Amino acid sequence: MVTAKQSKFTLPLLEPLVALKVSYDGSERVDAKVFQEEIDKAYQKGYDEASQQYNQQILDFRTEVNALREGTFSDLENKFTTIISEAREALMTLTHDCVSRTLGGLEFDSEIILSIVNSVIEESGLDDEKMEIRLNPLDLELLEDLEAELKSKHPRLTFTPDKVLKRGDCLLSSRFGKVDGLLRTKLNRLKDGLRPN
C-alpha cells in the first residue's frame, strides 16, 4: 500500500492503483458541539478572572479612598482643634490686655477704693480680728472720709500707706495670713478664669 500526504503536486505511482484509503494524519478531530463548549468555557474562565481582578482593584481603590478620607478628616479635626485653641488663647490675651488698659486709664474715686477694700475684707472672712490694710497713699487719701464708717464695722482695722503699691492695689494682713488684692493678681485670675478647663 502506498501512503501519500496531501500535496498540490501530482503524485506519480509506480504500480497501478487498485484501492485508495484516505486517512487524516493531524490532531484528533473535535466535534463542533464539543469545540463550541470548550470556547464558551474558556471565555467564561477569562471573564471570571477579569471580573475578579477588576473587583479586587475596585476594592483596593475604595480602601485607599477611605484611608485618604479618614486622614483628611483627621487632619482637619486636628487643625480645627489647634485653631480653636489658638483663638481662645488670643481672646484671653486680648481680654486681659483690654481690661489692663482700661484699668490703667481708670480714674480712681472713693467709691472704687471702698469697693476694693470691702472685697479684700470679705475675701479674708474676718470682721472683729485685727487687720492691717496697705494702700497706695493716693488711694488712702480718698478713704479719709469713709475711714470712720469702715472702722465702725471693723473696729480693729488699721490703714497703712505703701508707696510700692500701685493705684487700686490693696493688701490685707492679719494673724491668719495675707489676702492679695493686687490688680495684677486679679487680672491673672481673670485670665485663668477665661481659660477652658
Image (cartoon, rainbow, N blue to C red):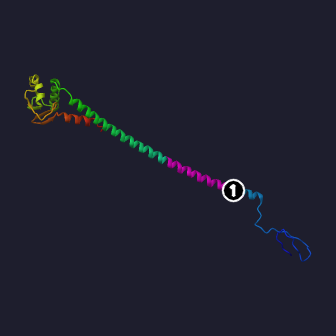
Residue at 39% across, 40% down: 80
Going by the numbered disc 1, the residue's amino acid type is Lys
Q: Which residue is mark 1?
A: 41
The number of callouts visible is 1
Residue at 71% across, 57% down: 39
Instruction: Give the left or right position of residue 94, taking residue 26 as reference.
Output: left
Residue at 52% across, 48% down: 62
Instruction: Give the left or right position of residue 109, taking residue 26 as reference.
Output: left
Secondary structure at badge 1 equals: helix
Instruction: Give the left or right position of residue 82, taking residue 47 as reference.
Output: left
Please say whether residue 83 is one of the residues in the magenta stretch: no
Q: Residue furthest front?
A: 105
Q: Where residue 86 sits in the image (x, y, percent)?
A: 33, 40
Residue at 53% across, 51% down: 60
Q: Is residue 188 above or below residue 44?
A: above
Q: Which residues are magenta?
A: 38-65
Label 1 CA crowd tier, 10 Å (few <14, some 14–19, many 20+):
few
Q: Is residue 143 above or below residue 181?
A: above
